[in-house]
Image: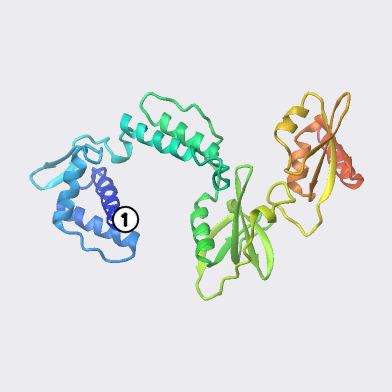
């Protein structure tokens, strides 16, 4: 596997070099670039031979890898792509590739009834659509929400690695309320996604914090601090909440009414796993959920505007009513 990985690194490095038309690339230049890339990825010196790079170029030119790279030699010593727009990352997926990938998808579908794979069906549909749309002149059938300006996604990999390897992180963080950024040493426990936003659940001085990844400025490892692993089970930790905000408060029974025409949407897409239908009325449906009261719950209820009414508890009903009164004032 390591040799295959090294080969892929070399192919990508050669491709990167030959796409740079501002430099003339000799075989020695390509050897040096591949050696540097392998050192950067593997963290150790790898002696790349002249013969290895020559074989790499020969393979990239051939159909064996599906590249058919138009690599040519000019002025008897320099290498380049005859087509300046070519890249191995741009090659179209062949019919055979699509067939093989679809067979793999169908194989995975056979495991969908196992508990481990119970949430795979949506993933497989997206994968199948991605395979379909990768063919030339095919447009995607599934359109997913994408926020190209979403910040903080670059921290997912290092945070995931820190949790997996049980490492303490030093995080530079600035909340929306803070005037300045501050540093904190945290024991990362869990990554949480909600509403197309990512959060980190972490320990700091034996207290749980939820940090939004889009407010993280920088991360680095704290090698001299022992990691504390609380073995957080996300299904249990977030069991009584909507969203990512968990408090020390107990969950409460929230009762609300939804207008008749919109009730089916709430029935088919519940606010929370605890949601139950209490009563059908002439003008709507009354539901119950058992959750902690938090910001995400408020925002969800307020998002329904005039189509919802909180019935119980009284204190929470008055809290929503106060926010609605303030909303009306904003329009006066």
Q: Name the residue under label 1.
A: 1
As drawn, 199 above or below 61: below
Q: Is residue 317 above or below residue 304?
A: below
Which is more toward the observer, 299 or 174?
A: 299
Furthest residue toward right? 314
Horizontal side of residue 16 vs 327, given as left or right:
left
| Residue at figure coordinates x 30%, y 52% from the top left | 9
Q: Give the x, y percent position of residue 44.
A: 30, 66
Can residue 26 be spotted in the picture? Answer: no
The residue sitting at the bottom extreme is: 224
Q: Quadrant of residue 42?
A: bottom left
- Report the residue at 65% width, 67% height from top: 204
Specify the quadrant of the image occupied by residue 189: bottom right
> Residue 153 in the image: x percent, y percent?
52, 49
Vertical position of residue 136 compared to residue 239: above or below = above
Q: Residue at x 60, y 42 (%)?
A: 196
Where does the image place residue 328, in percent across and percent down from the top left?
A: 84, 34
Left of 17 or right of it: where is 193? Answer: right
């Amino acid at each position: 596997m390591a040799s295959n990985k090294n080969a892929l690194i070399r192919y990508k490095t050669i491709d990167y070099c030959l796409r740079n038309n501002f430099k003339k690339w000799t075989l020695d230049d390509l050897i040096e670039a591949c050696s540097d890339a392998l050192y950067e990825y593997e963290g150790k010196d790898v002696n790349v031979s002249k013969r290895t790079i020559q074989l790499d170029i020969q393979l990239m030119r051939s159909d064996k890898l599906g590249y058919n790279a138009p690599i040519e030699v000019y002025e008897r010593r320099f290498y380049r792509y005859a087509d300046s727009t070519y890249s191995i990352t741009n090659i179209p997926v062949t019919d055979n590739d699509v067939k093989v990938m679809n067979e793999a998808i169908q194989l995975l579908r056979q495991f969908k009834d196992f508990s481990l794979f119970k949430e795979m069906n949506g993933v497989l549909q997206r994968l199948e659509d991605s395979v379909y749309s990768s063919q030339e002149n095919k447009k995607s059938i599934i359109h997913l929400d994408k926020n190209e300006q979403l910040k903080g996604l670059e921290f997912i990999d290092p945070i995931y690695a820190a949790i997996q390897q049980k490492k303490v992180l030093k995080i530079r963080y600035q909340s929306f309320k803070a005037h300045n950024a501050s540093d904190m040493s945290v024991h990362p426990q869990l990554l949480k996604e909600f509403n197309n936003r990512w959060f980190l659940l972490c320990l700091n001085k034996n207290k749980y914090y939820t940090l939004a990844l889009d407010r993280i400025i920088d991360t680095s490892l704290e090698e001299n601090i022992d990691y504390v692993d609380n073995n957080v089970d996300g299904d249990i930790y977030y069991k009584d909440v909507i969203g990512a905000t968990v408090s020390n408060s107990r969950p409460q029974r929230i009762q609300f009414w939804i207008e008749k025409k919109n009730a089916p949407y709430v029935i088919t897409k519940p606010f929370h796993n605890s949601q139950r239908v209490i009563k059908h009325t002439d003008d709507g449906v009354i539901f119950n959920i058992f959750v902690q009261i938090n910001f995400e719950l408020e925002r969800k209820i307020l998002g329904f505007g005039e189509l919802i009414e909180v019935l119980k508890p009284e204190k929470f009903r008055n809290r929503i009513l106060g926010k609605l009164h303030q909303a009306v004032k904003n329009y006066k």
